[in-house]
Image: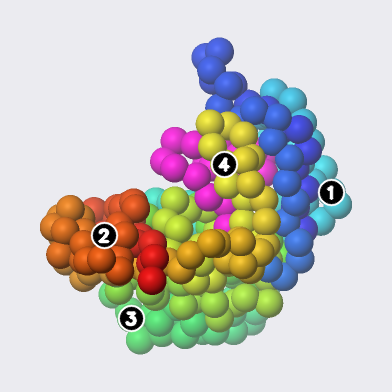
Amino acid sequence: MLEIRNLTKSFNGRKVIDDISFSVPQNCVFGFIGANGAGKTTTMKMVLGLLNADKGEIKVCGERVRFGATETNRLIGYLPDVPEFYGYMRPKEYLRLCGEIVGLSEKTIRTRSDELLELVGLSDVNKKIGGFSRGMKQRLGMAQALISEPKLLICDEPTSALDPIGRKEILGILKQIKGRTTVIFSTHILSDVERICDRVAVLNKGKIVLESEINDLKIGRKSKTITLEFEKEVEPDEVLRALGKDNIVPTRCEAAETSIENLFLEVSK
């Protein structure tokens, strides 16, 4: 569905993307992993033709992506990390506008809108978008991205600013559409990747340092990993000290969000 070959991009003389290559198979959820600022969004914008690559080639469904008004965007649905809306509109009005922009018939727009609002849990919501929570906006953004039944869905950090319930809702939607479209799931939250992704590529300092099937990564682990998720903010060091027993060896801790801490602990016995 997506082929990237020798892609390079620099800003003000600093190389952000350094000669990366990877491919995304059809009908999978592909995790594009990297720390904040690693270049994930830059890569996605080049796939969408919104940024001009310094070097390299991008193909979507075998068609070359070109900077500007690229024809390949008819095949892509896009959910940015912070989707923007017309706050005075209601969900169905907004989806009608999106459907008209991509050239859908009135009948198709009505049918698809009803299906998608049901999928994202907004079928009974008729208030203006300006009054939506962050999670509701992300779910409406997902419906918008799917309105044209794209062959490739790009989700750029869709769970990055959500609370645990909002993250669970977005991951649930992605699980439901798995198999109906190919998904690129850009994130820095490793636990989300493990839950829904089939294949991953890891971006670090502008380079792809790992590309693998998720099952191969799991098999390759020498020890088991436990992930603890807390509904409220906690101090990682306190939890690690509390679990510092002889049979549990804490090795690292990563904060997934400001509202949730994921603690990764290696089990030695």
Circle 1 or circle 4, nearest the eye? 4
- Residue 32 falls within the magenta-colored stretch: yes
Callout 2: helix, strand or loop? strand
Three-letter code, disc 3 = Val
Callout 4: helix, strand or loop? strand
User: Cα distance, mark 4 to mark 3?
Assistant: 38 Å
User: Cα distance, mark 4 to mark 2?
Assistant: 22 Å
Residue lying at 17% horizontally and 53% vertically, measured from the top left: 237
Residue nearer the viewer, 80 or 31: 31
Q: Which residue is mark 1?
A: 63
Instruction: Pick whichever of labels 4 and 3 is earlier in the sequence.
Output: 3
Residue nearer the viewer, 257 or 218: 218
User: Cα distance, mark 1 to mark 3?
Assistant: 39 Å
> Residue 248 location in percent, x, y?
30, 66
Residue lying at 73% horizontally and 40% vertically, measured from the top left: 21
Callout 3: helix, strand or loop? loop
76 horizontally vs 190: left or right? right
